[in-house]
Each structure stands twice: as C-alpha cells, then as structure tokens.
Image: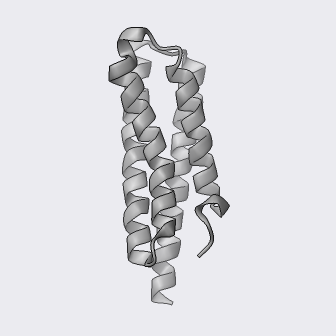
Amino acid sequence: MKSHKDLDVWQKALDLSVEVYRLTGSFPKDEVYAMTSQMRRAAVSIASNIAEGAARRTDKDFIHFLHTALGSASELDTQIEIVARVGLADKEKIQVLQSEVGVISKMLCGLIRSVENKKHD
C-alpha cells in the first residue's frame, strides 16, 4: 500500500480544507462556533479519514474509512449549500467549493470501487 500522501484524492481533500479555512475566515465572528467550526471539521475529516484508512492493514478497513470520508464530503456539501442560501459567501466561491467537493466525492467512489474490485481479483 502506498502512503496516503501518494493518493490524488487525499491531496485534493487537503487543498479543499485549505480553501474552506480561507473562506470561513471571512465569516462573521458570530459564526465561529457555528458554521465556521462545522465546515472546518467536515473538510478536515475528509483528508483525515483517507489518511487513516490508508494506514490500516486491510482493504475492509480502508473502504470503511473511505466511506466515512465520503460522508464528510456530503456533510460539507450540505454546509456549503446552507452558506449559499444565507448569503455568507459569494456565488463564485460557493461554486468552486461545490465543484471541488463533487470531484472529491467521485474520486472517493472510484477508489472504493477499485479497492473492492481488487478484493475480487
């Protein structure tokens, strides 16, 4: 098994975390313990679960953590939609983040399929 740092999806998830930190840094101070905290935790969780899964010894464990990362991506996608609806960020930034979450989700699904198929070979 390669290091998690060799996985394109981990690298993209890390970049997404940085973008979420930048975006939420401009949120009003009354959002620090609300949306800011939630979005940061969800974004960090994506990359963290990919890394933790890659460090596990079995494909079953890896797949489990990839599914957890996928769940965090869905959580973040929902939070981004809420941010858009309440007007906490401009549309362009929202669209970029939504696009990145979509790409990462597809990559996670592909990696899950790949690991599952490897088990059947």
Apparent side of residue 49 relative to residue 12 in the rendered image (left or right): left
Q: Quadrant of residue 82?
A: top left
Please tell me whether residue 22 is drawn above or below residue 69 in the rendered image: above
Instruction: Locate residue 79: give its quadrant.
Output: top left
Residue lying at 63% horizontally and 61% vertically, measured from the top left:
7
* Residue at screen point 44% across, 55% down: 49
- Picture coordinates of residue 56, whole percent (x, y): 45, 71
Task: Kindly give the residue lying farthest to the left in the view shown.
Answer: 34
Measured as percent of width and height from the top left, residue 2 is found at 62, 71
| Image quadrant containing the N terminus | bottom right
Q: How many marks?
A: 0
Question: Where in the figure is residue 69, as x and y percent of width and height?
Answer: 42, 53
Answer with the quarter of the image where residue 14 lies: top right
Q: Residue at x 59, y 62 (%)?
A: 4
Q: In the displayed structure, would residue 106 be above or below residue 64?
A: above
* Closer-to-camera residue (3/77): 3
The reply, left or right, for residue 3 in relation to residue 26 is right
Q: Is residue 41 above or below residue 8?
A: above
Q: What colour-coding does the image apply?
A: one colour
Q: Please name whichever residue, 101 or 36, is drawn nearer the observer in this view of the structure.
A: 36
Q: Residue at x 49, y 22 (%)?
A: 24
The picture places residue 47, in percent across and down from the top left corner, at 51, 50
In the picture as drawn, the residue positioned furthest to the bottom comes out as 121
